[in-house]
Amino acid sequence: MEEAIEMGYLSHQTSTCGLRIHVNRDAFGENQSEQEKAIEKILFFVEKHWSEIFQFSRRSDYDMNRWAARYGFEKTGKEILDKAKSGKNGRYVAVNLKNYYTIEFRLFRGTLKYNTFIATLQLVNKICDVAISMSEKEIDNMSWSYFVSEITEPELVQYLKERRLYVNELVIESEEV
C-alpha cells in the first residue's frame, strides 16, 4: 500500500475504486441449503444495520446506490434472499450473490490505508461469524451496540471509534443545576 501511494495511485480519493471482499460459499456450510441459511442471515444483518454499515463504508449515497445498492429490509432473511435471487438488481448490490463459488461484499469504498483495509476484512469476518453461529431471531434481537461490544480486534475497534460506530460504555448524563 505504501508503494502504491508513493507511485501516485489513488483509491479512496477517486470515484472509480471500491474494496470488494469475496467469501467462499463453502465457509457457510457443506451443502447449498446450509450455505443459503447463512447467506439469508448475512443479508438480514446487512439490511438491519444498514445505517451503521453505510457509515462504515465511507461511500456516498450516490456511489452506494450505483455500486452497492441494497435489496431493502424485509421481515426475514429468506425474503431478502428471494429478492436477491430474482436478479433484477444485477451484480451492483451490497452483497452480490451472482458468483458461483463466492459471495461478494461490495459495500466499501477503496482504501490504501492498512488499518482501514484490515478493519474492513475483520468486519466482514464478524458478520460471517454471526451468520454462522446465531439464529435469525438472535440477529434480529441484536443491537449494533451489542455487536460491536463483542469485537476485540484492535484495528476494527480503532476504525469503529474513528467512524463513531463503537459505543460500548454506558454514558450517564448528569443534570446541571
Image (cartoon, rainbow, N blue to C red):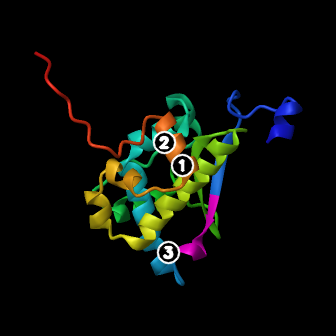
In the rendered structure, which amino acid carries the disc numbered 1?
Answer: Leu
In which quadrant of the rendered image does the N terminus lie? top right
Residue at mark 1 to residue at mark 3: CA–CA distance: 26 Å
Residues drawn in magenta: 22-28
Under tag 3, what secondary structure?
A: helix
Inspect the image, locate mark 2, and give the three-letter code of the amino acid beneath it.
Answer: Leu
Q: Which residue in the structure is indicated by mark 1?
A: 156
Q: Nearer the viewer, mark 1 or mark 3?
A: 1
Q: Residue 48, relative to residue 77: is it above or below?
A: above
Q: Rounded to the nearest whole Å, what is the CA distance between mark 2 and mark 1?
A: 6 Å
Q: Are marks 2 and 1 in contact (CB under 8 Å)?
A: yes
* Up/down of 36 relative to 146, above or below: below
Residue to which mark 2 is pinned? 160
Q: Position of residue 28 (x, y in %)?
A: 52, 74
Residue 51 location (% of width, % of height):
39, 39
In x, y percent, where is residue 146? Answer: 33, 53
- Can you name the residue that lies furthest to the top here? 177
Whether residue 73 is visible here, answered yes or no, is: no
Q: What residue sits 40% from the left and 51% below the top?
A: 148
Say which label, 1 or 3, has the lower sequence index: 3
Residue placed most toward the observer, 40 or 11: 11
Q: Position of 116 compared to 29: left or right?
A: right
